[in-house]
Amino acid sequence: MYAESERPRSIWLRAERTGRGPAPGHDRAGIAAAAVRLADAGGLGSVSMRKVAAAIGAGATALYRYVDSRDELVELMLDAVLADLRLPPRTGAWRADALAVARALDDVCRRHPWTVDVLQAQPPTTPHGVGLLEGALAALEPVEAPGQAKLEAAALMIGLVATIAATELAADRSTEEWRSAQEEYLRAVVAAGEHPHLARAIATSTPAAGDQDLLGRLLPRILTGLLDAPES
Amino acid sequence: MYAESERPRSIWLRAERTGRGPAPGHDRAGIAAAAVRLADAGGLGSVSMRKVAAAIGAGATALYRYVDSRDELVELMLDAVLADLRLPPRTGAWRADALAVARALDDVCRRHPWTVDVLQAQPPTTPHGVGLLEGALAALEPVEAPGQAKLEAAALMIGLVATIAATELAADRSTEEWRSAQEEYLRAVVAAGEHPHLARAIATSTPAAGDQDLLGRLLPRILTGLLDAPES
DNA sequence: GCCTTTCTGTGAACGGTGTTCGCTGTGCCA
DNA sequence: TGGCACAGCGAACACCGTTCACAGAAAGGC
C-alpha cells in the first residue's frame, strides 16, 4: 500500500511490540498513567518527558522508544482518561441521549482538568476518543441530517463541553496573585465609570452563586441550533 | 491602600512611562504589533521573547523593561487585535445585538487565528477586552436576569465564539503530515467496522461542505439557554 | 552648573524544555 | 551459534523564560 515504511503513522496503528530484541521494561499504559498522575497534580505544563521518565524510573530519553513526540504522549494520556467514560445506554430520545454523552465527558473534565486544554484544540482521534464520537453520533441517530452536519455537531459538542468546563474551572486553574491582579484592574475599570453595564452587572453579582447545570440548560438548545430539528 | 509598592499589579494599571531616566527606545504598541506579526505568521508558539526583541531590533532581554512576563506580552497582543473590534450600534433587539458583537469578535479570530487560544483560556481583561464585555452586556441590557447570569453569558459567549472559530479553523492550523496521519487512522477505524454510526456519517459527508453561519444558528439559542428568556 | 537618582539596554548565565545521536548490551530468530 | 533488531542510556543541541549585575544616559533637585 505505502512505500516501504517511511510514512509517519498514528501511534494507534503502530504495534506496541515487534517481537524482536529484549522485552521493554515499560508499556504505553504505565507511561500514560504516570503522565496522567503528573498532569492531575500540576496541569499539562508539568508533564515533561524527563519528569514522566523519572516517574516510571527510566532514563530521560527512554520514552522515545514508546512515543514519537510529546504530542503523542498527550494523545496517550487523553485516551487513558477517556477509557473511564461511562456512556449510558441509549433511550431513543436523542436530546437526552446526547446530553448523557456530554455529561459523561464533563465528568472526565472535572476529574482531570487538563483534558479541557486538549479537547478544546481538536476532537480526540484515539481509540476511546472515536468511541466517544461514535457514542455522540449514535445518540444523534434519530435526527434527520446529513452526515457532515452530524459530524460537526458531535465535534462541536465536545469542544463546547470543554469550554463550559473550562469556564467553571477557571477560578481553580489560575494562581492567586494573578487573580487578584485581574480583580484589581476590573475594580479600577468599574470605578472609572466608562463601562456602566459592566459596573451594574458586577454590582448585582453575588460572588458565590456559581449557577448550576449550565450543560443541561445549554446543550439541548445548542444541538437544536446545530441540527435545526424541531423539539422532540 | 497597599503596603509600599510590592503588590503585583496588572500591566494596565502601570504607567508606561515614569518620566525619569532616558527615553525608552520602544513602546508597548510597537512591541505588541511586532509580536502580533510573528503570531499571525507562525502561531502563538513562535512568539518568543527573543524573537520579538529581535523583530524590533533590541537585545534579547530588553522586553522585560516593558513587560513583566511573556503572559503579559500576550495580553498586550490580545488588546492590540481587540482594538480592531468594530462593535455596531445597538438596535434594542438583544438577540441581534449580541449576535453582532459575536460576529465582530469572530472577525478578529479569522484575521488572527491565535486569538482563539487566548480567548478559550479565560475572558479578556484588557482595556479593549472589557470594552468587548461591556458591548456584550449592553446588548443584553433588555434581558431581565441577575447580573451574575449576564456576566456568565457574556464570558461564555466569548469562549464559544472562540471554540466555534477554532473548530472551523482546525484544518488550517495543523501540519499536513499530522492531518494525514489522523485521517489514515480514522479510515482504519471505519474499515474495522466497530463504529457504524461514525462510518455512516463519514461516508455521507461531502468533504468540501463547510456549513455556513454556524454562529448565526447557534448563538441565539445558546443565549436563550443561558438567560432562559422567551424569544423576542 | 553639578550631582544624585532613576531608568534603559545589554550580555552572561541558570535551569528548564523537546529532541537527536551514538553507544552498549540484551534477547529473539534463523 | 551468529547476526540482527531492539531497549536503555548519556551527552549534546538548540531553544525557551527569566534573573542579575553592570554600562551609560537623561531627568530632578539644589
Image: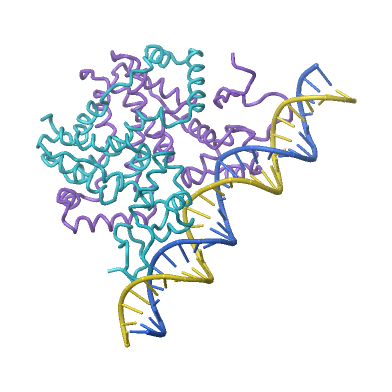
Chain colours: A purple, B cyan, C blue, D yellow
- Image x and y of residue B10, in percent: 32, 58
* Horizontal arrangement in the rendering, residue A174 relative to residue A19 (left or right): left
* Front in this rendered view, residue A22 or B19: B19
Residue at left offset 29%, top offset 50%:
B125
* Residue at position x 18%, y 46% in the image: B147
State the quadrant of the C terminus of chain B: top left
Question: Does residue A169 lie above or below C12 as drawn?
Answer: above
Does residue A165 appear to the left or right of B226 in the view shown? right
Q: Is B84 drawn above or below residue C15 in the view shown? A: above
How far across and down, in percent of the image, does residue A140 sit? 32, 18
Q: Nearer the viewer, residue A79 or A67?
A: A67
Q: Position of residue B175 (x, y in %)?
A: 48, 30
Quarter the N terminus of chain B occupies? bottom left
Instruction: Place residue A32 in its image quadrant.
Output: top right
Percent position of residue B154, x then y: 23, 41
Q: Is residue B45 above or below residue A86?
A: below
Q: Residue at x 29, y 51 (%)?
A: B126
Q: Total of numbered circles in the picture?
A: 0
